Amino acid sequence: MAGATKEEFTNVLIRQAMALFGEERTEELRSSLEERAEQLWLLDQAPLDREDEPAVMFFP
Amino acid sequence: MNLVEICLRRIEALDDKLRAWATVDRRAALDTARGLERELEEGGLCSPLHGIPVGVKDVYYTAGVKTSAGSKLLEDFVPEYSATAVQRLESAGAIVLGKTECTEFAANDPAPSRNPWNLDHTPGGSSSGSAVAVAARTCFVTLDTQTAGDVLRPAAYCGVVGLKPSYGRISRHGVVPVAWSLDTGGVMARSVEDVALALGVLAGHDPEDQSSSTRPVSDYSGAVRGWSDPPTLGLLRRYFYDHAGEEVREHTDRVVELLRSAGARIEEVEPPEDLGLVYAAHRAVVFSECAAYHQETFRQRPEDYGPKLRQLIELGQVTPAVSYIQAQRLRRRFGRRLGETLRGMDALLTPTTPTTAPSGLSATGDRRFQIPWTFAGVPAINVPSGLDRSGLPLGIQLVGALFAEDRLLATAYWCEKALGVDLHPPVDE
């Protein structure tokens, strides 16, 4: 979702939640979903270099 | 024998109100104590933790002893084998008194444990019972885990020493996971020396655990005892002072002055990354991995999950894969930059928590001061540093370089001696 706005992140999470948990549960989760969307948006803004690879999960 | 009996008597006297222990295996503990006593009388070798009563967080498998991880889903689960870390403790002569309470699946739904300094305040989590058990002198050492701030925060709230070593230093084999790439074995005790002794027993490669490091294990107790030079510390004010309460900020400044007057070289340093961003990245990793682990069971028995864990899993289920990978990329960069910040220093210093233990038992406090170090995989330790105006413990957090536990423990020991703080909660009054 490179370059997506906070609102776009929120909409994606809400659509996903509706599909998985239904409307009632999504409403209950709305403020948490908005908070998550803000964090994911923040993460999306992180200026990572092309050379930055993911942390390996396990040490060799 | 005597030590075990004393601890068991204290559990009997105090645990109705403190609720630190999920299971106490009294008979097994006494039998083991008798056996170890005989070994000593017969002139056998005295192992490092010979006869020392310990507690084990209820996420570690213990053969023949219930391991519930604070969950209804595992209320009847009795493992057939013990976690490698538990085996190591027992091989070193430790006597496992039982299992300590933790939050549900070591996540956010609180344990029944209460803070020994004020029963109406949280002891923190997820290693809630362990911190209470050590603070109340019902055992000497506990074996714990940290995924966010699960060792250092309860240790700070309850006034004990808590160490989270580097990721991979203590085996995770036989541990109920929260998030595989973050879960780290840890220990609590009443002094840095005791923590060093326990780490010496627990650290080391385990072929059963893919994340277990093959790096050599140092002589941690020797490092602690052999250290005498004042340390060089980097004080992190940015982010930590932005989020800390006034009393914590003032206290940390006083601690810094005290350590300086004792000879420590302390200079202020800047965080190597936006720690708000690091927090967001950590959450993306925890939520995703936790949702993956619980996926099948959650689909079958959602009603058996507590409300906070249920929400965490649901939020993990909707976290995009790309966000998870970006978080792991940021994690590697943060670790590299943190290593550069730590160059030439023995440790970084911050307050361990933004406030002392909050009132209420429905939540376990703010984990944001411990998260960066768990995310980077570096070792961190809480050293108790005093009491606030309402009589609750305060602590400083020292953060070391990856796999430099020997240096971190030696630094913590020096600070512990310079501060001269020994906290006793009012549980016997």
Image: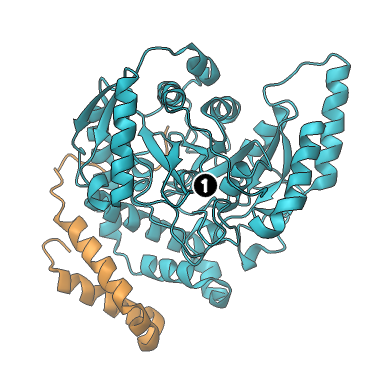
Q: Nearer the viewer, residue B57 or B355?
A: B355
Query: Which residue: 51% across, 15% down?
Result: B225
Q: Is residue A11 left or right of residue B423?
A: left
- Residue A26: x and y in percent read 35, 82
Residue B283 % position (x, y): 34, 57
Number of numbered discs on residues: 1
Residue pictured at 31% horizontal, 35% vertical = B254
Amino acid type of the residue tagged 1 in the rendering: Cys
Q: Please indicate whether residue B295 sits to the left or right of residue B233 in the image.
A: right
Pick whichever, B293 or B108, lies toward us: B108
| Residue B82 visible | yes
Q: Position of residue B12 (x, y in %)?
A: 77, 51
Name the secondary structure under disc 1.
Answer: helix
Judge from the rendering whether residue B44 lies leftward or rightward of residue B295; answer left or right.
right
- Residue at 55%, 54% (x, y): give it: B115
Residue A28: give x, y in percent of width and height.
Answer: 37, 82
The colour scheme used here is by chain
Q: Colour of chain B?
A: cyan
**In front here: A44 or B282?**
B282
Residue ID for mark 1: B158
The residue sitting at 44% across, 63% down in the picture is B291
Placement of the N terminus of chain B among the 4 image quadrants: top right
Q: What colour do you see for chain A? A: orange
- The chain that hosts pointer 1 is B
Q: Quadrant of residue B18?
A: bottom right
Please identify the quarter of the rendering in which residue B32 is found: top right
Relative to B99, B362 lies left or right: left
